[in-house]
Every structure is written in C-alpha cells, then in structure tokens.
Image: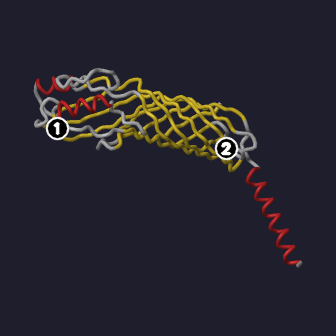
C-alpha cells in the first residue's frame, strides 16, 4: 500500500511540475499588431505551369484568447503577387494547327484577407513558436499575362505585343484579338503559417496557400471551346512564402 501511495504522490508531483513548466511562459492575452514583408514562390495548379517568384507585404491583428493556453485568432490584409510561367510549345488562338515555341507568364496581384486560428508556445521569455490555419479571400487588383514568342522578325515582334494584356480586365471573348482573354478577379482558399518570434517583436514566418477557385471565367472557357474546339484546363493558385515581420 505504501508503494502505491508513494507512486501516486510521485506522479502527482511530476504532473504538477510539468504543468507549471508548460504554462510558465504562457503568452499574455490581448490584441497585438504585426507588419511583414517577404518573398513568394507561386505557381498555377493543374495547368502545367512552373514556379514564379514574387513579393508580398501586409499587416495582421492577433488576438490572444484569455485562459486559452496560447490559442489565438488572427486576421489581416495582404498585398501579394502570384502567378506562374511555362516555356513550351503552344498553339495559335486563330489557328489551332499552328504551334509556336515561347514563354507564357502570369503575374497576378491580389489583395488578400486571411482569417485563421493559431496556437503559440513560448519555450522561454524571449522566444516563441506558433502555427496557424484557416481560409483566405482575395480579389485581383492588377497583373499581366504575357507571351514571348521565340524567333526573329517583325511578325514575331507584333505577336509579342499582341500577347501582353491586363489579366483581370473584363473584356468579351474575341478569337481575333488575344488581348481579350479575361480572368476572374475573385479567389478563395486555405492556408497555414508557422513562425518564430524573438524578443516579442522580431518574426520569421513560412506559409503556404492553396486556392480553391478556377481563375478562368466560365464565359471564357465556354467561348474558347466553341471558337477553338479545345478545352482550357482548370487553373488554381498555389503560393509558398517566406516573410519577416515586426510585432508592435
């Protein structure tokens, strides 16, 4: 009986010490703000496009929930560059039997609003780690879709100029004018971020976002098939980011 009592007492003391250590550096409840900037590596899913470098910056509000042992809510507003590129053979929009060698690039600029739930653990007074997950909503505010055709001569130069257009401008489809290929502005998806904070101010973060929306307009997809006889693949955003931030 003594051994059992001693074992229970030892277990209780161990559990108490472990809990004291676990919550010794628990983050303080309340609201804080963070500004950040950094680099994106993005691509367009399901389209054969490769990665493209870009940039992002923004501001976040974090609310550490009281008595939640490190759980917090976060939301913000970001400006981010997404897109992709591919160097390959592609077909003329006017003549599907004619192929060219060239490079296609999307440069898509978005304003994003991420809303996430996170958890933070401070390993010591001046160093903490955190992770968060949740949806984002975005609207396209600018960008270009550019096609550079390999070769020489005036005809190639004319083609280069024609295949450079505002990615989000809402034109009607016209198979005789490659400038009029519209992309929808709205995007939504899910993302996560992990990070480390030093001295309650300096942050280093890594994140990924997966878009759920097909960024081609339905009208474009239908008209393209009717006029050219080819189906456009679904195109969705993917983004990997590395950023640094400062908490106020």
- In this view, the residue farthest toward the right is 2
- 60 or 215, which lies in front? 215
Query: Pointer 2: residues within 10 angstroms few (<14), some, or many (20+)?
Result: many
- Please tell me how many numbered marks the rendered image carries: 2
Q: Helix or strand or loop: what does disc 1 sit on?
A: strand
> In what quadrant of the picture does the C terminus appear?
top right
> In what quadrant of the picture does the N terminus appear?
bottom right
Q: Label 2 belongs to which residue? A: 71
- 198 or 172, which lies in front? 172
Residue at position x 27%, y 26% in the image? 181
Q: Position of residue 240 (x, y in %)?
A: 44, 42
User: In which quarter of the view is residue 212 placed?
Assistant: top left
Q: Earlier in the sequence, mark 2 or mark 1?
A: 2
Q: Position of residue 76 (x, y in %)?
A: 56, 30
User: In which quarter of the view is residue 18 placed?
Assistant: bottom right
Picture layout, residue 60 above or below residue 193: above
Query: Pointer 1: residues within 10 angstroms few (<14), some, or many (20+)?
Result: some
User: In which quarter of the view is residue 170 placed?
Assistant: top left
Q: Helix or strand or loop: what does disc 2 sit on?
A: strand
Q: Label 1 belongs to which residue? A: 101
Query: Is 243 left or right of 198, judged from the image as shown?
Result: left
Mark 2 or mark 1, whichever is nearer to me: 2
Residue at position x 25%, y 35% in the image? 104
């Amino acid at each position: 009986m003594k051994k059992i009592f001693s074992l229970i007492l030892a277990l209780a003391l161990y559990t108490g010490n472990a809990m004291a250590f676990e919550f010794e550096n628990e983050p303080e409840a309340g609201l804080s703000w963070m500004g950040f900037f950094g680099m994106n590596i993005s691509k367009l899913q399901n389209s054969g496009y490769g990665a493209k470098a870009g940039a992002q910056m923004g501001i976040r509000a974090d609310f550490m929930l009281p008595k939640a042992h490190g759980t917090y809510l976060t939301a913000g507003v970001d400006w981010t560059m997404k897109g992709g590129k591919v160097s390959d053979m592609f077909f003329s929009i006017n003549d599907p039997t004619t192929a060219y060698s060239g490079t296609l690039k999307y440069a898509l600029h978005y304003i994003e609003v991420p809303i996430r739930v996170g958890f933070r653990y401070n390993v010591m007074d001046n160093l903490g780690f955190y992770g968060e997950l949740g949806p984002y909503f975005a609207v396209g505010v600018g960008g270009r879709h550019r096609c550079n055709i390999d070769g020489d001569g005036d005809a190639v130069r004319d083609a280069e100029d024609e295949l450079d257009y505002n990615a989000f401008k809402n034109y009607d489809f016209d198979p005789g004018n490659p400038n009029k290929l519209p992309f929808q502005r709205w995007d939504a998806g899910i993302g996560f971020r992990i990070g480390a904070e030093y001295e309650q101010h300096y942050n280093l973060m890594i994140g990924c976002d997966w878009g759920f929306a097909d960024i081609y307009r339905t009208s474009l997809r239908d008209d393209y098939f009717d006029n050219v006889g080819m189906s456009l693949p679904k195109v969705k955003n993917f983004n990997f980011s590395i950023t640094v931030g400062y908490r106020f």
